[in-house]
Image (tube, rainbow, N blue to C red):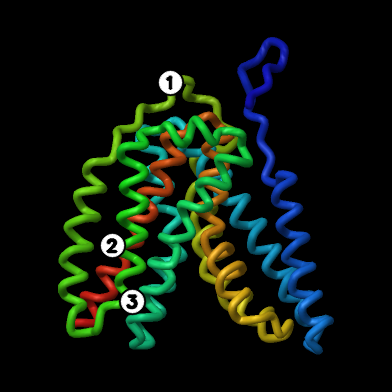
Amino acid sequence: MTTHPAGGNPRPNFNFIQVFDGVIWGLVLLFFSGSAFFSGGNVFWALAGAAGIVVIMFLVSASVEVIIEVLKDLKGLGTLVGFITNGPEALCLIVGLIAGDVLFAASTPLGSNVMNPLLLLAAAGLSGNLLVTAKTHARYSAPCVLLTAFLAVIFFSFPEEAYPLWLAGALVVSTVLFYRRPPEPADENGGDRSFSAAWFWPALLVLVGSGYFLDPVVSFTAGHSHAPKGVIGFFVLATLTSWPEFKSTLSLLRRGKPLAAVLNITVSNITNIWLAVIGVFVHLL
């Protein structure tokens, strides 16, 4: 949405924090502190860790908004953002490979492929664009998210000696899906930004760094809160580690860019497959 000051150019209605952010942050604080209180954990450190998670989530929200505002006039915005928001998964992959654990290395990018489509639906619903999003190149987006999610899930059923088979199939399917993605037009309105291009690299650094530190901060908080591992794994880790994708999708939809929002998720899923392929290939070497 834009406002039009008298005698001037349209100016973006720019805000890092939305009502939904505040609700989620409150639930994070309540979840971990409540778990610590009722399970005999350390309430102080659980609350401190939860506050750290909220700070990281704010940094993710702010950096995503800045990046999209800087790049909003470019053709291929959804594809670019889809690549950028996979920075945290790439870092987790590297950490796992250094540790020599291919399953750990691949679990973060592959796990995101299951959560990302759900977050797309959530963002579309919250922005009031559910029907528009569902109709946006559905013949491409639906098969793409289903196939990439399927490739992610079946990887964990393959024994190590069959990894080359998964690697070959995943590489072929993901590459075809990437080159079949619908083209994005450049923004015809162009030229009016809230931030100069100089803010792009600092914002990208903040986004990647925040995504990298989110998982250890969540693990620290979970240890002190004694939160159930099943709930932590499904709700906290799966959702919060995909926060960059969710925030970028929500931001794009609020800017009236449903195609860019859909491609953000589909390209993110494709990139996650490529990251896992790289991890498996390095492991096999």
* Residue at 53%, 66% in the rendered image: 238
Label 3 Cα neighbours within 10 Å, binned few <14 / some 14-19 / many ≥20:
some
The x and y percentages for residue 83 are: 38, 52
Image-based side of 166 in relation to 264, left or right: left
* Residue at 28%, 40% in the rendered image: 181
Q: Secondary structure at mark 1?
A: loop
Query: Which quarter of the figure has residue 148?
Result: bottom left
Query: Badge 2 is on which residue?
Result: 274
Query: Who comes first in sequence, dot 3 or dot 2?
Result: 3
In contact (CB < 8 Å): disc 1 and disc 2: no
Residue 199 appears anywhere in the view: no
Tell me if residue 205 comes above or below residue 222 in the rendering.
Answer: above
Image-based side of 54 in relation to 237, left or right: right
The x and y percentages for residue 172 are: 17, 57
* Residue at 58%, 63% in the rendered image: 240
Tell me if residue 87 comes above or below residue 180 in the rendering.
Answer: below
Say which mark, if any, is on residue 60.
Answer: none
Q: Amino acid at mark 3?
A: Phe
Q: Secondary structure at mark 2?
A: helix
The x and y percentages for residue 254 are: 58, 34
Image-based side of 139 in relation to 237, left or right: left
The x and y percentages for residue 31 are: 75, 70
Indicate the quadrant containing the N terminus: top left, top right, bottom left or bottom right: top right
Q: Secondary structure at mark 3?
A: loop
Q: Amino acid at mark 2?
A: Trp
* Residue at 36%, 51% in the rendered image: 145
Query: Badge 1 is on which residue?
Result: 188
